[in-house]
Amino acid sequence: MNQPPVPPQGNGLEGLPCLYCGEAYEAGDISRHTEPIHCGPCITCVDKPACFSCRLMYCVCDVHRYRG
């Protein structure tokens, strides 16, 4: 039996892995993974979403600070 494909729910981004952190995200987390945050002077973090984790040891941004 051939079944028709199931249409995607919402905008189709749910469940896809994030480009910045690799986590799969649902509809409630879209802004955390896609909307840029203007966080501060660190050149690595400029316009990255909240899920981004900076790899720069001297990052001073509260949201993206290096946690290694």
Image: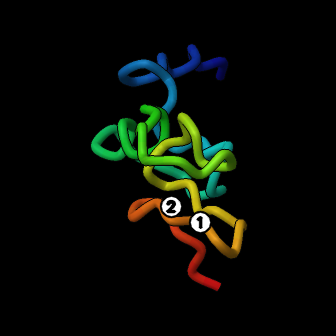
Residue 2 percent location from the top left of the image: 66, 18
Residue visible at 59% across and 52% down in the picture: 42
Amino acid type at circle 1 is Cys
Residue visible at 61% across and 46% down in the picture: 18
Residue with the most extreme bottom position: 68
Residue corresponding to mark 1: 59
Residue visible at 57% across and 14% down in the picture: 4
Q: Are marks 2 and 1 in contact (CB under 8 Å)?
A: yes
The N terminus - image quarter: top right
Residue 36 lies left or right of residue 3; in this view the side is: left
Relative to the observer, which residue lies in front, 57 or 23? 57
Residue 3 lies left or right of residue 10; in this view the side is: right
The C terminus - image quarter: bottom right
For marks 2 and 1 on the same chain, the one whose residue lies earlier in the sequence: 1
Relative to the observer, which residue lies in front, 44 or 41? 41
Q: Quadrant of residue 52?
A: bottom right
Q: Secondary structure at mark 1?
A: loop
Residue 58 percent location from the top left of the image: 64, 72
Residue corresponding to mark 2: 64
Residue visible at 35% across and 46% down in the picture: 29
Amino acid type at circle 2 is His
Q: Quadrant of residue 43?
A: top right
Total marks shown come to 2
Residue 35 lies left or right of residue 68; in this view the side is: left
CA gap, disc 2 and disc 1:
8 Å
Q: Secondary structure at mark 2?
A: loop
In this view, the mark in front (2 or 1): 1
Residue with the most extreme left position: 28
Relative to the observer, which residue lies in front, 31 or 54? 54
Q: Which mark is residue 1?
A: none
Q: Residues within 10 Å of mark 2 (few under 14, many from 20)?
A: many
Seen in the picture, residue 39 relative to 58 is either above or below; the reply is: above
